[in-house]
Image (cartoon, helix red, strand yellow):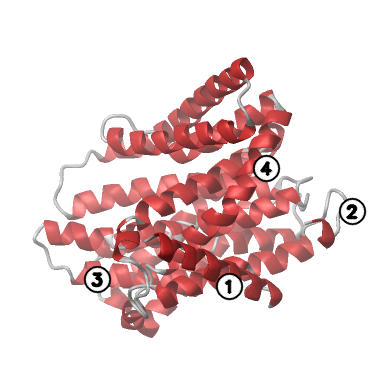
Amino acid sequence: MVLNIAELVIGGLIADLVFRKMKMPGLVGMLLLGVIVGPYVFNMLNPDLLNLSSDLRMTAFIVILLRAGFELSKNTLHKVGLRAGLLSLIPAIFEGIVITFLGHSFLGLSMMESAILGAVLSAASLAVVVPIMIRFMEEKRGTKKGIPTMILAASTIDVVFVVVIYGILIGIYTGHKVSIAWQLAGIPISILSGIIIGVGCGFMLYRIFERFNPRATKRLLIVLGVSIFLVNIEHSLERLFPFASLLSIMAIGLIILEKNECMAREIAAKLNKLWVFAAIILFVLVGAQVDIDVVVKSGVMGGILICLGLVARSIGTYLCLLRSSLTVSERMLVVVSCLPKATVQAAIGGAPLVAMRLAGMDTNPGEIILAMAVLSIVLTAPLGAWAMTHLGDRVLVREDPKFSASER
């Protein structure tokens, strides 16, 4: 397995370099590499590595969230808070509603099955969006208006909202007793508790670091360990006490940044180095989840339905930006940033199929939902990443005009 990881790292670095030379995001190359070496094409990945795929992807995902947290500014969050709140809800609702009502006509699904499909498809991809927004923040692109911060915050809450809605729908569909009122109340509860727990952990870690002054590498390992612990605690307590560990992880970085910027920058610098490895693992293993046969099975009608959902999502996104200070070009960047799919779709795309099988139900709807989840990744992740990078580099105004490409 170690040899396989080494091969992935070398292959990922080459794919990243080649696609950057082609003026495309390196993550697109890594995603395609994952598809090629994955079990559904050439099957070059060690089975033991595939068994650990979920844990490895989650660890890499935590690195993304920590990087985002150490780049967030409390003042900027205050400035974009309302817009970020709207963007975290309205676009997903628009997309989910369209897919719910068109699912029967396009795919032969019932209304409830279409609603489950809408929940699976309507989350944007943090794995695609966050690295690109962090680069814009590092390059001071659009930071004066808080555009990258707004997109980061909105995308994170969007994931929490969509996953909760999915849990409600699949519970009702498979006949489990679900308290809809409690589940809906769980959305604001999980968001608030996630922030509170993250702030508490951030203050605790800051005090420990101030008291014992460990090296930056040890600080990073401690922050990473606490973040992994929070994710596991969320899964253990989700039925008793909901909290969004994704927001907790980002809040840790934000608090340390507010309390001691020098300390935060040192940890962030270590995270940036770790991200080189984590990015390869994340995007290659996400690509390895793509089953080409399942994509083909989705057919043209599935692709059209996904596109119609994205149109509805784009309309919802643009409506959230009316009367804002953003230019038309900047609004279009925000619209594009809400389109890519990958993280949630790879994580829960196959969950309805498993739930239906365990409930002794017809699994055909679950197979269709899985196929659509995979197809959404194929259609939107590479194109969305390219569009975000291409558009952002052109329309986002640099806060520091002296910054040059050679300084990246």
Of badges 2 and 1, nearer the viewer stands 1
Callouts 3 and 4 close, C-beta under 8 Å: no
Q: Which residue is drawn at 33% across and 57% down?
A: 348
Which numbered circle lies on residue 367? 3
Image location of residue 128, percent across then percent down? 55, 60
Amino acid, disc 3:
Glu
Q: Find disc 4 in the rendering and name its residue.
A: 269
Which quarter of the figure has residue 254? Answer: top right
Image location of residue 373, percent across then percent down? 37, 67
Residue at mark 2 to residue at mark 1: CA–CA distance: 31 Å
Left or right: residue 247 versus residue 320 is: left
Q: Find disc 2 in the rendering and name its residue.
A: 401
Which numbered circle lies on residue 15? 1
Q: Residue at x 35, y 38 (%)?
A: 232
Q: Is mark 1 on a helix, strand or loop?
A: helix
Left or right: residue 334 versus residue 343 is: right
Amino acid, disc 2:
Pro
Amino acid, disc 4:
Ala
Callouts 2 and 1 close, C-beta under 8 Å: no
Which numbered circle lies on residue 365? none
